[in-house]
Amino acid sequence: MPNWCQNTLNVSGDEKSIAAFLNAARGRHAGYKDIFYDIDTREWPAHDDVRVKALVKDPAPLYEKEYDFCMNALYPVPLDFRRFPFDDNSAYKLGVIAGEKRDFGGYRWQTNNWGCKWDVDGELTLQEPTFLQYRFDSPWSPPVAFFEKIAKDFPSLTFELEYYEPGMGYAGRSTFDGEHYDEVELPLEDFEDWEE
């Protein structure tokens, strides 16, 4: 179980860009082929190579629940990764069985590209024509790598991410616009009212 990092995201820009982001940010988490199959023992009723290849043929569906802000909506997990388990070791093992080399699974892809291992369940808390505010929790740290990419995809918007991780005792503000990234540490006392 991770420590949860509490995040508030402020997005500002012109009305057209804000409307486009509002629409694009809404989405569902990526699904993975987290199968009920013991890869180590290969114990699976009526198991054969044809069934394994069929299992990894298509990506897992997205989860049903839709969120106001979802990283997979803006920076989707590649379909190829969603054909295998989320867990890196399981993805590797299933890749060996299926005859498809897998260096890692969704866990490492999300960590490398989003800056945290799981997607977020972002809630829109304020909406104005030129401003949006979302709140969400992320595991262990703020998803800085994600915003570095998204700021380039939406160069006319400014993203300000305030975060507070009480378990490890740090807080800060990261600001992203298409070309610049700035980060400042903030005093923990400023976030005492964020605690649940």
Image: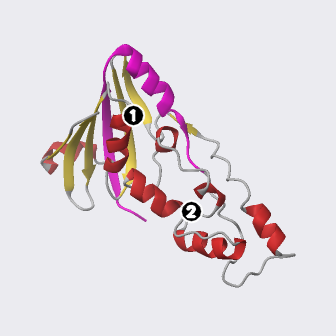
Residue flagged by tag 1: what amino acid is it?
Asp
Whether residues under marks 1 and 2 lie with C-beta atoms below 8 angstroms apart, the answer is no
Q: Is residue 129 visible?
A: no
Q: Which of 65/193 is in front?
A: 65
- Which element type, helix, strand or loop, lies under badge 2? loop
Position in image of residue 69 (x %, y %): 46, 36
Position in image of residue 96 (x %, y %): 65, 76
Q: Residue at x 45, y 22 (%)?
A: 20
Magenta span of residues:
1-30
Mark 1 / mark 2, whichever is N-terminal = 2
Residue flagged by tag 2: what amino acid is it?
Phe
- Which element type, helix, strand or loop, lies under badge 1? helix
The relative height of residue 169 versus residue 184 in the rendered view (above or below) is: below
How crowded pointer 1 is (Cα within 10 Å; few <14, some 14-19, many 20+) is rated as some
Q: Is residue 154 visible?
A: yes
Horizontal side of residue 164 vs 103, given as left or right: left
How crowded pointer 2 is (Cα within 10 Å; few <14, some 14-19, many 20+) is rated as many
Horizontal side of residue 111 vs 104, given as left or right: left
Q: Mark number for residue 86? A: 2
Q: Mark number for residue 153? A: 1
Position in image of residue 120 (x %, y %): 45, 46
Q: CA distance from mark 1 to mark 2?
A: 26 Å
Quarter of the figure with the N terminus? bottom left
The relative height of residue 44 versus residue 3 in the rendered view (above or below) is: below
Q: Residue at x 20, y 50 (%)?
A: 171
